[in-house]
Image: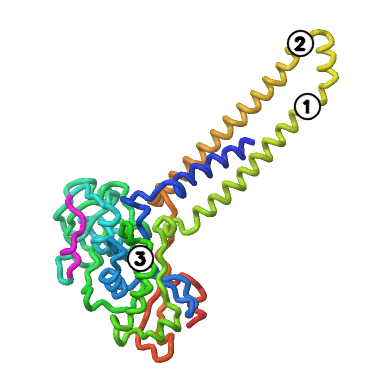
Amino acid sequence: MAVGLSTQLVLFTLLERIALRALPYPEADRLVELTFTAPGMGIEAFGLSLGTFAHFDREIDELDALGLYQPGHVDLSALDWRRRIPAAQSTPSVLQILGAVPAVGRTLNESDARPGAEPVALLTHDLWGTAFGGGEVVGRTLTVDGRSHRVVGVLQAGFRLPFGEADLITPLAFDASGAPFGGFTYRSVGRRAEGGGGTLDDALRGAVGSFPAAFPGEITAGEIESMQMATVVTPLKEAVLDGVGRSLWMLWGVALCVVLIAVTNVANLFRARAAGRRTESTVRIVLGAGSAFRRPFVVEGIAVTLVGGLLGLALARLLLTTLLLDMGDRGHGRSTPSPSKPPVVITDCLPDAGARWVVPNTDSSARTAL
């Protein structure tokens, strides 16, 4: 019973923290991720490219804002501190959509992401404390992958990107007017327009249909039809959980059944014990013991319940402390799918295809389709 109770408490706490609690971003219920699917090539899901992002950003009015970023790792040097750390290249719109607030300095702005702009960097609160001891950092120069970057700010403690860890964020600088169609290796974050989100799927379908006109010589209508290329809109919370919430609900249901079975077994034990003492109880009643003979049964039941409950609470506390500390060490309070799978390079995957496409290796069937 104690084990069943502790399991219930642990699973429900995880459910509340992971599945029931809203993501820590403003208007989180309006946030979505855009991905592509190409069933004709056996690829279930892959990210956006610079060109498709720029095209959607221009054409889709059903989104208030759309941002793009790419998680990865960089070699960082700051004074005598040198590490290979998780980082991300991001459009400034990602930080605006996610409500990033600077603890020191500022976040990224549009001028930082213009081609030819001065290289700048934004630190997380954790990296600020680790590399600089929480001291003066704005205006200082860091070396990121051998290139100097000026620090413009530090993010507020606790801020995380939805997908992948990033201790350092640099601007994703590119020319939107000449961005290529290929290179589908980026994660996206968008915010539905209020009152207009219901037509987003239709708007994206139309935008995909206009790819041949927007990217002449890179993609044709026949290739889109052959790939069955389409856009998938996923609520951001669902994309972040990546099925973990559903699994937790199933485990919680199983644990509830275990608790019910345990409680039933304990009740049956008490019933069997009472049946074994039926003769003794009858004699006591005949001798005028009244209701006093019931006291041992009541005390025994309360004692077993209290001991089982206290053991369950203690075990649950121990398990939760261990789990939450581990989640804290990983830098996340929620499930985060790994963005680090190597890309699959798709070359001449369709007859007369003049484009070279790169998509994340999210499905082993992608290799079979090549």
- Looking at the rendering, in which quadrant would you find the N terminus? top right
Secondary structure of residue under mark 3: strand
What crowding class fits label 2: few (fewer than 14 Cα within 10 Å), some (14-19), or many (20 or more)? few
Report the front residue among 17 and 54.
54
What crowding class fits label 3: few (fewer than 14 Cα within 10 Å), some (14-19), or many (20 or more)? many
Please tell me which residue is depicted at 38% across the width and 50% down the height of the picture. Answer: 23
276 is higher (above) or lower (below) than 222:
above
Determine which quarter of the picture holds residue 272. top right
Instruction: Give the residue number, with chain letter if any, for mark 1.
Output: 273
Q: Amino acid at mark 1?
A: Arg
Instruction: Give the residue number, with chain letter if any, for mark 3.
Output: 187
Report the front residue among 71 and 220.
220
Question: Alpha-carbon distance for marks 1 and 3?
Answer: 63 Å
Q: Where residue 290 is drawn, which disc sits there?
A: 2
Q: Is residue 310 left or right of residue 331?
A: right
* Residue 22, position as x, y percentages in the image: 40, 48
Determine which quarter of the picture holds residue 80. bottom left
State whether residue 265 appears in this view. yes
Q: Which stretch is magenta?
A: 105-114
Q: Where residue 248 is drawn, which disc sits there?
A: none
Q: Amino acid at mark 2?
A: Gly
Secondary structure of residue under mark 1: helix
Question: Alpha-carbon distance for marks 3 and 2?
Answer: 74 Å
